[in-house]
Structure formats: structure tokens, C-alpha cells
Image (cartoon, rainbow, N blue to C red):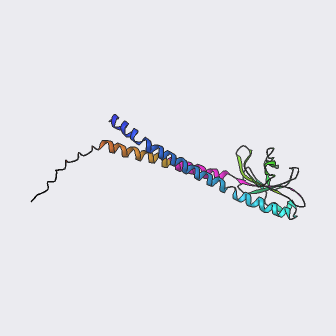
Amino acid sequence: MVELLRRAFFRMIPFAIVATFLAVLCYGVGQQVLRQTADDLPTQMAEDAAARLAAGQNPGAVIPVQRVDMRGSLSPFVIIYDEQQHPVASSATLDGGVPSLPPGVLDAAKSGDHLVTWQPAQGVREAVAIVPYRGAQSGYVMAGRSLRTVEQHENLVLHISLAAWVCCLMVLFLYFVVAEYTPEQPRQAQRPVRERIG
């Protein structure tokens, strides 16, 4: 019995490698689609706000009216920075103040839109889009949204991929165990066909 299981295991290895590759591929595609989709709303909000600022509107009139506590809210937010990279208007707060970006983040957006994952505090992760604007005044618009639900969906995709992978390996192993256990039926020797002459 042990020998049978060993033979079945080694016969399934090439198929298990393919199943593993497909499971990793499915998870990777799903995770990337979810993460990239999280950037859509911040990009739209940042570009719209930058266009309004470039047209001459006041920063205070561009940001959303609703104030967002980044530690507990899933709502999107907008923060506007002047050319010296100082925040001039914000709909987001973190622990009672405007959160600070890491050095160099706004510099990277000077040439165009810039997408980053921002973690201003432990347990707070945001999908952020930064868009520079030029006009009567210059600066940067940053819009973001929480990644909490996106990461929950990514974990769900991971668990589904793992479950499918384990089930596939079990089915493959059982198939090869049955294939090894079932003896091959000997082929019946074919009788030569004699041609009738005359």
C-alpha cells in the first residue's frame, strides 16, 4: 500500500506543479485587479480638484465638505498642498491633525500623476493619487481612500485560491491512487486474419 501511494505521489508531481502555478496566477491577477481598481476614485477626485484649482477656485471650495477621520472612516478625502508642499486645505484628519506625507512623495508628482500606497499610521493604509496643478497658483492635490475593504477582498481571493489549490491536489492524488490500484487489463492477442485465396 505504501508503495502504491508513493508511486501515485510521484506521478502527480508534474500536474501538481501546473496546479500550483495556476493557483498563484489566479491570486496574483485577482489581487492586482482589486488594488489597481482602488486607485480609480482617488485619481478622479484629484484630477477634478486640480482642474478646478487651475481654473482659479479657492482650495477651501474644492475639498469635500465632509471631514474624514482616516483611522475609522472608509470615505475618500482630499488634501491640497501649496507649491512649498504645505497643506492649505484638507478634508482628512488623523488623530486630530492633518497627516504628514513622507519626504519626496510630492516631488515625485511634479511631472504628472503619482499613485502610491500610504500608511500614515499603524493600521491605516490608503490608496492615494497625487496630481500637480498650475494656474494662478500652483501646488498639488492628493486624494485618497482607505484600503481596508480592498485588503479584505484580497484576503478572500487568497483563501479561495488556496482552497481551490488544495482541492485540486487532493483530486489529482486520488486519481493517481486509483490509477495505480487498478490493474491494467492485458490486451488480448489479435488473431491473424487469413486471407482466403481462391
Q: Is residue 33 left or right of residue 100?
A: left
Residue extending farthest top:
2
Foreground: 114 or 119?
114
Relative image position of residue 39 (x, y in whole percent): 70, 55
Foreground: 39 or 110?
110
> Does the magenta run of residues contain 176?
no
Residue extending farthest right:
136
Q: Is residue 167 left or right of residue 30?
A: left
Q: Is residue 61 at all visible to an observer of this figure?
A: no
Relative image position of residue 97 (x, y in whole percent): 82, 49
Q: Is residue 97 left or right of residue 145?
A: right
> Does the magenta run of residues contain 160?
yes
Residue name at image x 51 percent, y 49 percent: 22
Q: Quadrant of the C terminus?
A: bottom left
Residue extending farthest front:
198
Relative image position of residue 189 (x, y in whole percent): 19, 47
Q: Quadrant of the N terminus?
A: top left
Q: Is residue 42 at all visible to an observer of this figure?
A: yes
Residue name at image x 23 percent, y 47 percent: 187
Which quadrant of the figure has residue 196?
A: bottom left
Residue name at image x 67 percent, y 51 percent: 148
Residue name at image x 71 percent, y 47 percent: 124
Relative image position of residue 73 (x, y in whole percent): 72, 54
In the image, the segment drawn in magenta is 134-162
- Number of marks present in the image shown: 0
